[in-house]
């Protein structure tokens, strides 16, 4: 949908396809940084003398926690100075800290560098969401968000294999060098082709009172708050999966060599589902598709936990059920993000930051708790994700009980953006 001068100039400069491709590739910086490391965790633990095997998960968890720690920084800066300069600063720091990871001589330094890399990478999560909100509304916004998330989800298909291929010819440190190179490539593309998308009338100050007011408004508004909490609970399942899957495949099922195939087999249909979401959300509506996705996510994870509890689950059955859960997740993640941002147009950067803080740090802590409970079986993971996914659906039910599974709204039913927030925000 055209949203004025910013949208028009962006489309002339990039075109809609390149716009989506660029935003998606920026979002993929994160999934590549996370998933490419999965095959290297045992080698990292061995070379850096990590005593507790579960501590290897910190290479992933530290990134998530660092990622969440600066989300509230990037948004207000982008609302004040514009999207381009803040994006450039964050992506440049991402590449620098990737190189610091490559040079780390101890596990403690590696974890610190990973946290810093995640802190820098948070700029892409905030600004991709804010730029999509700058340019689109409603179902069209959800469609574009789904396409960007699709690339984010395709990366788990490729990243572990890329990481494994690098390990065949180079040490684990080379993976971080490749991450730095990808970051620099994205920095060049964005600075050459991406125009400013922030509307001049939406620029904000960096006064603490203004930032606090906008942050509070994003959490006080019931729809933003409710869908952010639901996204946090759903994200906890994703973090738990990413941080636990290597141990589950290697120890619970005794198939360490199968990790790349398992990861790709689960992620590929997840990416296809995200693309399908982008095609159907305009027809059936954000709520009907998103709510159905969360309901299916909860149902599949509960069934998976019960089957796993019987003690008769094989690795192929685990992959089938986990892939089914991730397909359902793909139908809820982008739509929950869109619904959380629906009324946040005038404070898009700060709102994306605040929502990201809650969803990412909260989801990271949930995933960390589930991952740390690993006991040599998949049971803690299965029951933890079932509880978290069910909590996400209950949160949506409490947030919009009268609009549960509602179809698309007619144009005249959508409240004007001027009425989204109090005039002082």
Image (cartoon, rainbow, N blue to C red):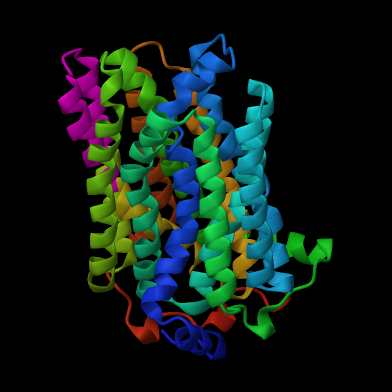
Q: Is residue 413 left or right of residue 197?
A: left
Residue under the point 55% across and 54% down: 183
Q: Is residue 127 magenta?
A: no
In the displayed orientation, state which residue is furthest to the front.
Answer: 169
x then y, percent, for residue 35: 42, 38
Residue under the point 42% across and 16% down: 374
x then y, percent, for residue 122: 60, 51
Viewport quadrant of the C terminus = bottom right
Residue under the point 71% across and 77% down: 203
Residue 237, by quadrant, is: top left
In the rendered view, tell whether residue 349 sits above or below residue 194: above
In this orientation, which residue lies closer to the viewer: 341 or 410? 341
The residue range painted magenta reads 299-328
In this orientation, which residue lies closer to the viewer: 185 or 369? 185
Q: Is residue 87 left or right of residue 388?
A: right
Q: Is residue 391 left or right of residue 315?
A: right
């Amino acid at each position: 949908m055209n949203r004025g001068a910013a949208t028009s100039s962006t489309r002339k400069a990039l075109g809609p396809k390149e716009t989506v491709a660029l935003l998606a590739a920026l979002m993929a910086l994160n999934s590549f940084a996370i998933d490419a490391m999965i095959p290297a965790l045992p080698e990292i633990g061995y070379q850096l003398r990590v005593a507790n095997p579960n501590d290897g998960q910190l290479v992933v968890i530290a990134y998530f926690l660092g990622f969440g720690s600066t989300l509230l920084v990037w948004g207000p800066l982008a609302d004040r100075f514009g999207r381009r300069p803040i994006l450039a600063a964050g992506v440049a720091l991402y590449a620098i800290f990737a190189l610091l990871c490559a040079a780390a001589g101890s596990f403690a330094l590696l974890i610190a560098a990973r946290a810093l890399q995640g802190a820098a990478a948070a700029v892409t999560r905030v600004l991709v969401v804010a730029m999509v909100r700058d340019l689109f509304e409603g179902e069209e916004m959800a469609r574009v968000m789904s396409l960007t998330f699709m690339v984010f989800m395709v990366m788990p298909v490729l990243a572990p294999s890329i990481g494994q291929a690098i390990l065949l010819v180079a040490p684990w440190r080379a993976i971080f060098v490749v991450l730095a190179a990808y970051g620099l490539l994205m920095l060049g593309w964005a600075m050459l082709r991406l125009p400013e998308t922030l509307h001049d009338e939406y620029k904000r100050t960096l006064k603490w009172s203004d930032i606090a007011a906008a942050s509070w408004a994003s959490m006080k508004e019931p729809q933003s708050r409710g869908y952010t909490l639901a996204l946090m609970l759903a994200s906890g399942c994703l973090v738990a999966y990413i941080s636990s899957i290597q141990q589950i495949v290697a120890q619970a099922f005794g198939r360490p060599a199968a990790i790349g195939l398992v990861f790709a087999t689960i992620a590929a249909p997840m990416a296809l589902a995200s693309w399908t979401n982008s095609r159907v959300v305009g027809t059936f509506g954000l709520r009907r598709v998103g709510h159905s996705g969360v309901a299916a996510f909860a149902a599949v994870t509960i069934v998976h936990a019960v089957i796993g509890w019987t003690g008769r689950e094989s690795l192929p059955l685990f992959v089938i059920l986990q892939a089914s859960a991730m397909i359902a997740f793909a139908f809820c993640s982008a739509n929950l993000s869109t619904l959380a941002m629906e009324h946040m147009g005038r404070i898009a950067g700060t709102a994306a930051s605040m929502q990201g803080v809650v969803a990412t740090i909260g989801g990271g802590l949930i995933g960390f708790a589930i991952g740390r409970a690993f006991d040599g079986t998949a049971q803690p993971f299965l029951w933890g994700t079932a509880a978290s996914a069910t909590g996400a659906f209950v949160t949506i039910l409490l947030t919009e009980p009268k609009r549960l599974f509602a179809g698309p709204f007619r144009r005249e039913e959508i409240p004007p953006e001027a009425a989204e927030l109090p005039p002082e925000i």
